[in-house]
Image: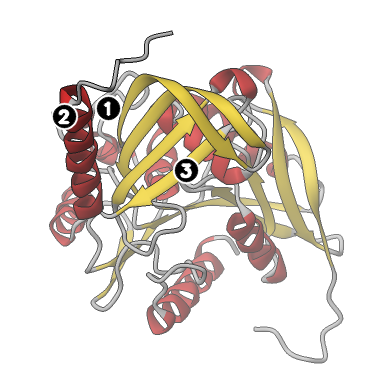
């Protein structure tokens, strides 16, 4: 069982609307719904709100890599943009 | 063999048993109507949790004349939809082998204590449950038959050892105390065909009563009809092998 975890700050929209996120759990394991045997499963959760406070994404490994690259590219562009100030609460 | 002139009935629903550490464990229990005596099967659910599929499996065994019992091994961790609970358990690295063994032992003792029991009980599991089924056969001296379906991580390397899964189950092979039926797909990645071969060789070397069946066109979880990995002819034959094995070992 491969599962990596990281704390996150942000919001996610679940079945009952928006909720604050506290953790992202990233596993390389059997997905619940996606059709392949193994995939990259990302759960954005707030453990303080119960196990139902979960945003689930199941990606193929190739898709997960492309997403990770895309996030980093967007971050790089944003950090270079002089009109964008980093927001820290 | 079911025939259409039989009048059958079944009782199925949730009960609470005392599991490892006397913890209350929600448990699905299906049993044929009638005084028995009936053999029993303990079902160990897979990593996706105590889900609808496992309730169906439980009723299937009851339909075939078994006291069938399936404890929620994730009961302590959380309550919620099976997927949400399983995701939370996955994030914590699963549940410990020690805890699972305690819950499985309790489920077996519960069904054996019933007046309708014939005194024989098997254990069945798929995926992580298949691993736990093999481990149960090695660590618990209560089972008369073991059914391991594509048990992933029966053979673990050092990098997979954790506090919750501290020992590779195959290292207990010499302690296996009952006949074992193994059902595997050759296209599976966990266990791989090479791992299945090693597993079988270790059973053979230990002089154990085993029978392994491999399905060349099947991958992981090929009994799961709600998944693309379902493989009809292999699944039908596999279920037949299971009921044949139980008929021989629990009568």
Task: Residue B34 in the image: state x and y as whole percent.
Answer: 86, 64
Q: Are marks 2 and 1 on the same chain?
A: no
Of labels 2 and 3, earlier in sequence is 3
Residue B201 rendering spot, x and y as whole percentages: 15, 54
Q: Quadrant of residue A3?
A: top left
Which residue is outermost to the bottom? B4
Residue B83, above or below A43: below
Left or right: residue B149 compared with residue B31: left
Residue A56 numbered tag: 3
Q: Residue at x 59, y 23 (%)?
A: B20
Between the residue at mark 2 and the residue at mark 3, the CA separation in whole angstroms equals 26 Å
Q: CA distance from mark 3 to mark 1?
A: 31 Å
Nearest to the observer: residue B35 or residue B123: B123
The residue drawn where x is 21% and y is 42% is A70
Residues B35 and B237: in front is B237
Residue A9 falls left or right of residue B11: left
Name the element at disc 1: loop
Q: Identify the chain of the residue marked 1, using the numbered disc in the image.
A: B
Question: Which numbered marker is on residue B167?
Answer: 1
Chain ID at mark 3:
A
Q: In the image, is B108 to the left or to the right of A66?
A: right
Crowdedness of circle 1 by 10 Å Cα count: few (<14), some, many (20+)? Answer: some
Which one is closest to the eye, mark 3 or mark 1? Answer: 3
Q: Residue furthest top?
A: A89
For the residues bearing labels 3 and 1, Cβ distance under 8 angstroms: no
The mark lying in front, picked from 2 and 3, is 2
The residue at the far front in this view is A83
Residue occupied by mark 2: A76
Distance CA(mark 2)–CA(mark 1): 44 Å
User: Please, what secondary structure does the residue beneath circle 2 have?
Assistant: helix
User: Marks 3 and 2: in contact by CB < 8 Å?
Assistant: no
Q: Which residue corresponds to the image point at 43% horizontal and 81% vertical from the top-left?
A: B232
């Amino acid at each position: 069982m491969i599962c990596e975890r990281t704390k996150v700050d942000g919001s996610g929209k679940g079945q009952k609307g928006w909720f604050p996120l506290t953790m992202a759990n990233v596993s390389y394991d059997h997905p619940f719904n996606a059709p392949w045997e193994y995939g990259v499963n990302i759960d954005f959760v707030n453990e303080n709100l119960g196990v139902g406070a979960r945003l689930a994404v199941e990606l193929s490994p190739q898709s997960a890599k492309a997403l990770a690259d895309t996030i980093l590219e967007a971050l790089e562009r944003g950090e270079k943009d002089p009109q964008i100030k980093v927001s820290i609460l | 063999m079911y025939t259409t002139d039989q009048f059958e009935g079944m009782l199925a629903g949730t009960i609470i048993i005392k599991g490892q550490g006397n913890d209350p464990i929600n448990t699905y229990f299906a049993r044929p109507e009638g005084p028995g005596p009936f053999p029993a099967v303990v079902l160990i659910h897979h990593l996706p949790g105590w889900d609808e599929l496992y309730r169906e499996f439980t009723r299937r065994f009851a339909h075939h004349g078994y006291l069938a019992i399936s404890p929620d091994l994730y009961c302590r961790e959380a309550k919620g939809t099976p997927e949400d609970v399983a995701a939370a358990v996955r994030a914590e690295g699963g549940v410990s082998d020690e805890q699972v063994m305690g819950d499985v032992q309790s489920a077996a003792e519960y069904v054996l204590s019933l007046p309708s029991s014939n005194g024989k009980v098997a254990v069945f599991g798929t995926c992580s449950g298949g691993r736990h089924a093999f481990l149960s056969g090695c660590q618990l001296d209560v089972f008369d038959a073991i059914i391991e379906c594509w048990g992933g991580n029966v053979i673990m390397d050092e990098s997979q050892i954790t506090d919750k899964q501290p020992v590779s189950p195959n290292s207990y092979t010499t302690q296996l105390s009952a006949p074992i039926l193994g059902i595997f797909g050759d296209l599976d990645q966990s266990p791989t065909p090479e791992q299945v071969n090693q597993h079988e060789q270790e059973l053979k070397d230990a002089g154990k009563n085993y029978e392994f069946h491999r399905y060349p066109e099947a991958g992981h979880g090929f009994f799961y009809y709600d998944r693309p990995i379902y493989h009809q002819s292999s699944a039908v034959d596999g279920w037949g092998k299971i009921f044949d094995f139980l008929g021989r070992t629990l009568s």
